[in-house]
Image (cartoon, helix red, strand yellow):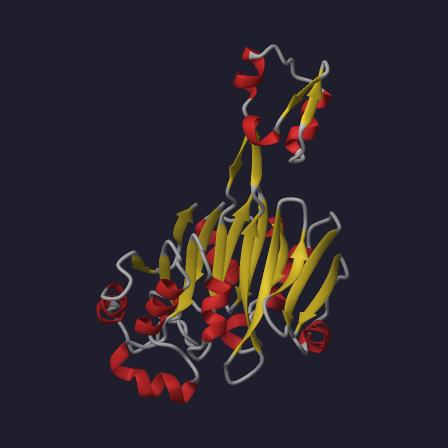
């Protein structure tokens, strides 16, 4: 899968950074996490096809995370083919999407399906044969949820070993693919002896929030943890006041969650240089990078 970061600024776009939006390409499917102002333009620059977007996962209803929705939906609707768009978000998402649709003259070529989340803990909000998405409530100034995209483990069959033992390919091998033992010509082939497990990748997104245990839960064992880092540690009191986290706290989350890589985002516009923010995090979690607009991460 490939993650393209489309905006790394907090609240206000700057010359170098747009506001929050992140595009995950999974097997050709476009999955958008938040949709701030200017998302369409960022996608154009990044060479991304908006018509591939099938799902949008919204974290909360502050304008810098949702104000690009109207334009994106309207543009998708201009294409002749019918388009189904699944939108996920915190409570009140249905009401707010309805208000957005009423605010413009839309051609009704997009079928929008909405699912709200108000989880008590870590809960699944979507699942298909390849992956599932989990949500958890976070602590911000308005209802906010974090997301965890989990690719399902895959079973790899050791075809060469089976061939050496005289087993031909065919529908009987499906049992091994299903995690079961296989019987072929009267002989039992144990699943554990002829398969291996390829662990699925995990992408976690911690948006605007105060520091807390739910941040760690949503980030557990993430291959890529994309985490808001509005302030450097020197402004930790400001972070508490505005219910944001510092880059040092983001690093603590990554460390406690056993994440493999941390990418910082959602920087206050006061930082024309990110060195202080990044250094604070790397002191605790060395495998940290500062995100930038159009950054691409393949994992």
The total of numbered circles placed on residues is 0
Quarter of the image that includes the C terminus:
top left
Q: Find residue 119 and report its horizontal and vertical position in percent.
A: 64, 72
Relative placement, left or right, of 42 versus 154 is: left
Which quadrant of the figure has residue 86?
bottom right
Measured as percent of width and height from the top left, residue 204 is found at 48, 60
Q: Image quadrant of residue 274? A: bottom left
Q: Residue at x 27, y 78 (%)?
A: 233
Query: Which is nearer the eye, 195 or 198?
Result: 195
Q: Compared to 139, does 123 lie above or below?
A: above
Give whichever of 207, 296 is nearer the camera: 207
Write the residue at 55% across / 70% down.
59
Asked whether the viewer can see residue 289, the reply is yes
Q: Nearer the viewer, residue 116 or 221?
A: 221
Q: Please report the residue visible at 51 percent of the width from the left and 85 percent of the height from the top.
A: 141
Q: Position of residue 276 (x, y in %)?
A: 22, 71
In this picture, is 95 found above or below 255? Answer: below
Rendered location of residue 158, percent (x, y): 54, 24
Tell me: residue 214, above or below residue 31.
below
| Horizontal side of residue 13 vs 146, given as left or right | left
Residue at 56% of width from left, 67% of height from top?
A: 68
Q: Is residue 258 left or right of residue 135?
A: left
Nearest to the observer: residue 278 or residue 29: 278
Residue 74 seen anywhere in this rendered image of the structure: no
Note whether 168 is above or below 43 in the view shown: above
């Amino acid at each position: 899968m490939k993650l393209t970061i489309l905006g790394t600024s907090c609240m206000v776009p700057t010359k170098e950074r747009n506001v929050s939006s992140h595009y995950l390409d999974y097997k050709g499917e476009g999955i958008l996490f938040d949709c701030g102002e200017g998302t369409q333009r960022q996608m154009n620059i990044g060479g991304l096809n908006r018509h591939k977007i099938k799902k949008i996962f919204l974290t909360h209803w502050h304008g810098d995370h949702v104000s690009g929705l109207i334009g994106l939906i309207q543009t998708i609707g201009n294409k002749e083919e019918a388009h189904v768009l699944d939108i996920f978000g915190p409570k009140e998402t249905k009401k707010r999407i309805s208000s957005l649709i009423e605010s413009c003259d839309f051609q009704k070529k997009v079928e929008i399906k909405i699912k709200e989340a108000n989880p008590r803990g870590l809960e699944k909000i979507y699942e298909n044969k390849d992956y599932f998405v989990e949500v958890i409530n976070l602590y911000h100034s308005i209802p906010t949820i974090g997301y965890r995209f989990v690719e399902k483990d895959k079973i790899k069959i050791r075809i060469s070993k089976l061939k050496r033992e005289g087993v031909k390919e065919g529908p009987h091998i499906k049992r091994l693919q299903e995690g079961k033992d296989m019987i072929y010509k009267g002989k039992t082939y144990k699943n554990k002896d002829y398969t291996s497990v390829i662990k699925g990748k995990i992408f976690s997104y911690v948006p605007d929030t105060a520091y807390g245990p739910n941040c760690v839960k949503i980030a557990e064992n993430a291959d890529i943890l994309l985490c808001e880092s509005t302030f450097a540690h020197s402004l930790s009191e400001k972070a508490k006041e505005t219910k944001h986290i510092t880059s040092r706290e983001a690093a603590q989350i990554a460390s406690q969650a056993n994440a493999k890589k941390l990418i910082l985002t959602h920087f206050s516009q006061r930082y024309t240089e990110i060195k202080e923010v990044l250094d604070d995090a790397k002191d605790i979690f060395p495998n940290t990078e500062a995100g930038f607009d159009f950054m691409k991460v393949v994992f």
